[in-house]
Amino acid sequence: MFLRSLTLKGFKSFADKTTLDFEPGVCVVVGPNGSGKSNVVDSVAWVLGAQGARALRGGKMDDVIFAGTAERPALGRAEVSLTIDNTAGCCRSSSPRSRSPARWS
């Protein structure tokens, strides 16, 4: 069982719909300071059930929604979807792939 993909839209620094596709094996998230690496980790925690703003490095839950920039307006909604691949049958499931969405508006 492994993570197949992570899709973010309006979550923290990810204003546009962004999909990260993962392959079996070791995957890492690398990038310079301020590129959103910690926001990727926060999005996985959120879609897996973290509900407190502090668990997501925020002061209130509205902090998970893209707040806007000088060039882009703020968004009114955040969405994260995680797709898990279970084609190896490691966990009991009626489907080899399952998708779990989280939304806040």
Image (cartoon, rainbow, N blue to C red):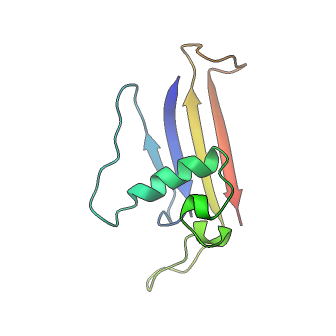
Instruction: Locate residue 86, reporting x and y percent.
Output: 57, 21
- Drawn side of residue 6 relative to residue 91, left or right: left
Viewer-proximal residue, 16 or 50? 50
Instruction: Locate residue 40, reporting x and y percent.
Output: 46, 53
Instruction: Locate residue 57, reporting x and y percent.
Output: 53, 64
Quadrant in the picture for residue 75: bottom right
Residue sitting at 56 percent across and 17 percent down?
87
Q: How many numbered marks does the figure carry?
A: 0
In this view, the residue farthest toward the left is: 32
Instruction: Locate residue 65, reporting x and y percent.
Output: 60, 68
Residue sitting at 36 percent across and 26 percent down?
25
Rendered position, 76 above or below 55: below
Rendered position, 70 above or below 23: below
Viewer-proximal residue, 80 or 59? 59
Residue sitting at 73 percent across and 19 percent down?
94
In this view, the residue farthest toward the front is: 54
In this view, the residue farthest toward the top is: 89
Indicate the quadrant containing the C terminus: top left, top right, bottom left or bottom right.
bottom right
- Drawn side of residue 48 relative to residue 85, left or right: right
Rendered position, 69 above or below 9: below
Residue sitting at 65 percent across and 30 percent down?
98
- Drawn side of residue 5 relative to residue 26, left or right: right
